[in-house]
Image (cartoon, rainbow, N blue to C red):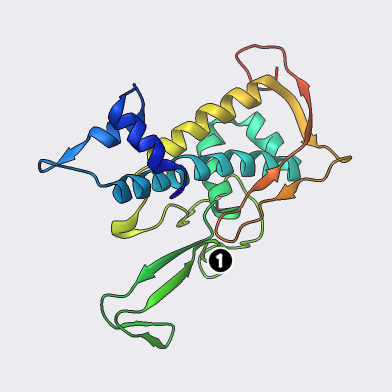
Amino acid sequence: MAAYLPALIAERRAAPQEDLLTNLAQAEVDGERFTEEEIIAFVQLLLVAGNETTANLLNNSMLTLAEHPDQLALLRSSQELLPSAIEEVLRYRTPIQFMFRGTRQDVKIGGQTIPKGKRVLAMIGSANRDPKQFPDPDRFQIAREPNPHIAFGHGIHFCLGAPLSRIEARVALTEILGRMQSFELASSEPWEPRDALHVLGPNRLPIRFEAAHRTAGWGS
């Protein structure tokens, strides 16, 4: 991003277009425009938080439902479970697996003291499989209740885009399930996980599906 964006930012400042990068290049806060470094950081945040997470949520939803045909059948028979199914995918295959945090004061946790000013690696994916919080945590259950996962963070750091991500997932999965009578993983081509540490999802996900007759119901 540091090598790619500066030239584009300069282009947008010289010749504005109707796009987000132009808006960022022209935006002002308290009468001052963003610096090049601030724009690059903002774009990186948008790519990770606004695209990477939702793409992996959709991919993980398809993968997990294909791996659990009983839960897919339950979802098709009880469409009102879609919001709950999305929450369970977020818990079961959390798109962002960890996040860095910094301690502003000494913090005691798990019988240990983390000194002030230290970096902490919060393992979100592990927390979402904590047996103290989730009965039978390694089991995928679309009707799980309660489901206090922290896929979107917690407290003052809770993801601002969480409502949008949930809406996008509902719209996309409703359309997909309406267009596909059935689907399964393509046995001839195994799916590939992302080659990354902090994000979880398939890099490629070959599936085999049967197209549905377009009616109001998912199972028609």
Q: Tell me the amino acid under the disc marked 1.
A: Ser
Quadrant where the C terminus is found in the figure: top right
Relative to 110, say whether 120 is above or below.
above
Front-most of 71 and 29? 29
Q: How many labels does the image show?
A: 1
Check the image and report above or below for 61 versus 173: below
State left or right for residue 47 relative to residue 67.
left
Q: Decide which of 62, 141 is in the foreground and name it.
A: 62
Seen at 71% across and 12% down, the residue is: 213
Label 1 SS: helix
Residue 71 in view in this figure: no
Q: Residue furthest right?
A: 188
> From where the camera sits, is residue 170 visible?
yes
93 left or right, relative to 63? left
Image quarter of residue 66: top right
User: Residue 55, position in %: x, y?
Assistant: 56, 39
Percent position of residue 77, x then y? 65, 30
Give residue 36's position: percent from left, percent from top.
30, 46
Q: Name the residue under label 1.
A: 126
**Is disc 1 surrounded by few (<14), some (14 to 19) or many (20+) residues within 10 Å?**
few
Q: On the rendered structure, is 114 left or right of 33?
A: right
In this picture, is 89 found above or below 78? below
Q: Position of residue 122 (x, y in %)?
A: 46, 68
Quarter of the rendering containing residue 209? top right
* Nearer-the-camera pick, 195 or 143: 195
Rendered residue at 50%/38% (across/down) = 83
| Residue at 60%, 45% in the rendered image | 142
